[in-house]
Image (tube, rainbow, N blue to C red):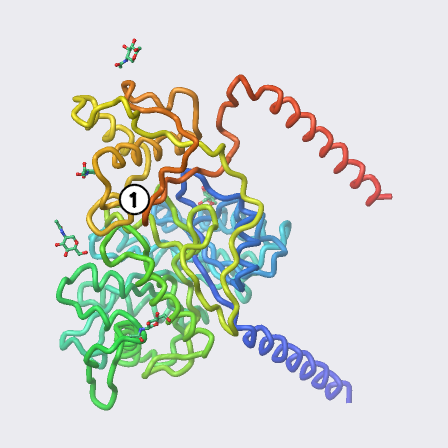
Amino acid sequence: MGNNHNHNYLLCLFMTFLVVEGLTKGVAGMACNWGLQSTHPLNPNIVVKLMKDNGFNKVKLFEADPGALKALGRSGIQVMVGIPNDLLAPIASSVSVASAWVEQNVSKYISTKGVDIRYVAVGNEPFLKTYGDKFLHTTFPALQNIQAALIKAGLGRQVKATVPLNADVYQSDSGLPSAGDFRSDIHDLMISMVKFLSDNGAPMTINIYPFLSLYADPNFPTDFAFFNGSAAPVVDGSIAYTNVFDANFDTLISALEKNGFASMNVIIGEVGWPTDGDPNANLVYARRFNQGLVDRINRGQGTPKRRSPPEVYIFSLIDEDKKSIDPGNFERHWGVFNYDGTIKYSLNLGKGKALVAAKGVKYLARRWCVMSPQASTTDPNLPGSIEYACTYADCTSFGNGSSCGKLDARSNASYAFNMYYQTMNQMKGSCTFSNLSVLTTIDPSHDTCRYEIMIDVGKHELPPSRSLAAATGKHSSVMALVLVLTLMILCVV
Ligand SMILES: *[C@@H]1O[C@H](CO)[C@@H](O)[C@H](O)[C@H]1NC(C)=O
Ligand SMILES: *[C@@H]1O[C@H](CO)[C@@H](O)[C@H](O)[C@H]1NC(C)=O
Ligand SMILES: *[C@@H]1O[C@H](CO)[C@@H](O)[C@H](O)[C@H]1NC(C)=O
Ligand SMILES: *[C@@H]1O[C@H](CO)[C@@H](O)[C@H](O)[C@H]1NC(C)=O
Ligand SMILES: *[C@@H]1O[C@H](CO)[C@@H](O)[C@H](O)[C@H]1NC(C)=O
């Protein structure tokens, strides 16, 4: 009897779980990557609000950033927290290093901040061919140690350890998805790792980039990169593939089937399209790709070989102007939103719901640093000045096919000077450039080329004439503190 009662209770719990799970699925939550390599990062609380306003209920972080994790506490957003590659070796070396990482960067945030951490991403694309064997010997041991540390911390069920891998860990000799298998140089390593993930109920995580297929191969059929293209399909037995995403994903599914892991859970850790820095990186293509992606997510669509949809983390939420441009200038422009949370292009998030921009963003003063009308484009100091500006500021919108690729020499210099001036938070002395530059309050932006004003991250010097405003500012923050303290006392009472 008691047993029966217990069963009913469990059944009821299970049903409630199903209903809640179903409801959250029904609102088609989306997942995104949140990278922090910016000279002017948005306030984390603004970013969390931005995610919630746009229906993102899962986020992937590349490291355990305290500001981001605190802001995610009790937000209702599920978190995958990453371990950067440079920590793989120390974590692989001992379980106690792994335990310290889990204690400080997972357990603490779950118990004291209410962060809903679901995954730990061990490394980031560690088997990328361009890394050679740099992380080949440390990734799997690091994964094992993190898994052991999670179990030791009592989080074995709640938090799963996975490794985000680049799609180049698998390949197909015939070019057809059905011939997919793991790359021969890491075949055994991949099998051991997949088995370990599977034994621990953890997913495999893979990053797929149709943009890079197009970027890498000038003969790649453009339409095949998109979900609604009209490229000639790739016929593989009874399946006709109409886009590279499906073909790529199913190459992995074939590799998994071939090696005895037909039901392995797979997550897409990154997928997206950049908007600048390359002729194929533009607003029209990015919108087309991401709209197709969002539509699939909302339809719950899988691929020909795997009908159930994978969890998909869009890359990325916002632009990052400090990312390495080794892969290309486009690397700093993957955001669905600009670095400041403004909208780049329209997207239908489902049922006609449009993107919502970030709220409460504070900007520096509306002034730009441009080339002085008195200065000459033949001034011998000009090339050096532009080069200097672009060494410290982001000039990746220059170049053929980019948003500022068609500027004349004068606008060109202005763009570089302004980027430097804004990146330096409009600091005094950051618009001098051998007397070639001057400040203006007229926005020099034209056509597709935006002359930015950076957001206020509290690092600029206030010019002397604004000292009164500064004093008022101080006064109001004292008032705010008094108000907060009063409220806290009232709450405690
Ligand atoms: C926690 O993560 C941060 C960010 O990656 C790292 O700097 C720190 O060393 C980690 N803590 C431990 C104890 O490993
Ligand atoms: C610039 O890019 C376009 C494609 O957008 C290409 O047709 C043209 O050849 C490129 N020009 C140069 C100089 O690279
Ligand atoms: C594909 O979808 C995009 C975005 O919805 C749309 O703008 C474009 O016209 C479509 N292209 C084709 C070939 O259907
Ligand atoms: C503009 O600046 C870029 C970067 O320094 C340079 O490659 C390009 O040739 C310049 N264009 C003109 C018209 O001066
Ligand atoms: C800038 O102009 C000032 C005043 O005209 C002059 O004294 C100074 O030498 C100039 N600086 C440079 C780097 O040309």
Element under label 1? Answer: loop
- The residue lying furthest to the right in this view is 493
Q: Looking at the rendering, in which quadrant would you find the C terminus?
A: top right
Q: In which quadrant of this rendering is ligand 4 seen?
A: top left
Q: Where is residue 433 drawn, in percent x and y?
A: 29, 22
308 or 399, which lies in front? 399
> Can residue 255 be seen by looking at this rendering?
no
Q: Looking at the rendering, in which quadrant would you find the N terminus?
A: bottom right
Q: Measuring 51% from the left and 54% from the top, which residue is drawn there?
A: 357
Q: Where is residue 450 drawn, in percent x and y?
A: 36, 44
Residue 340 vs residue 168: left or right?
A: right
Disc 1: residue Cβ within 8 A of ligand 1's nearest atom: no
> Can residue 356 be seen by looking at this rendering?
yes
Instruction: Determine whether 45 is above or below 390 in the image.
Output: below
User: In the picture, residue 129 is in which quadrant?
Assistant: bottom left
Q: Measuring 48% from the left and 38% from the top, which residue is drawn there?
A: 455
Q: Where is residue 28 drawn, in percent x and y?
A: 52, 72
Instruction: Determine whether 366 is above or below 78 in the image.
Output: above
188 or 85, which lies in front? 85
- Residue labelled with disc 1: 324
Residue 139 vs residue 156: left or right?
A: left
User: In the picture, residue 262 is in which quadrant?
Assistant: bottom left
Amino acid type at image mark 1: Ser
Instruction: Determine whether 194 is above or below 480 in the image.
Output: below
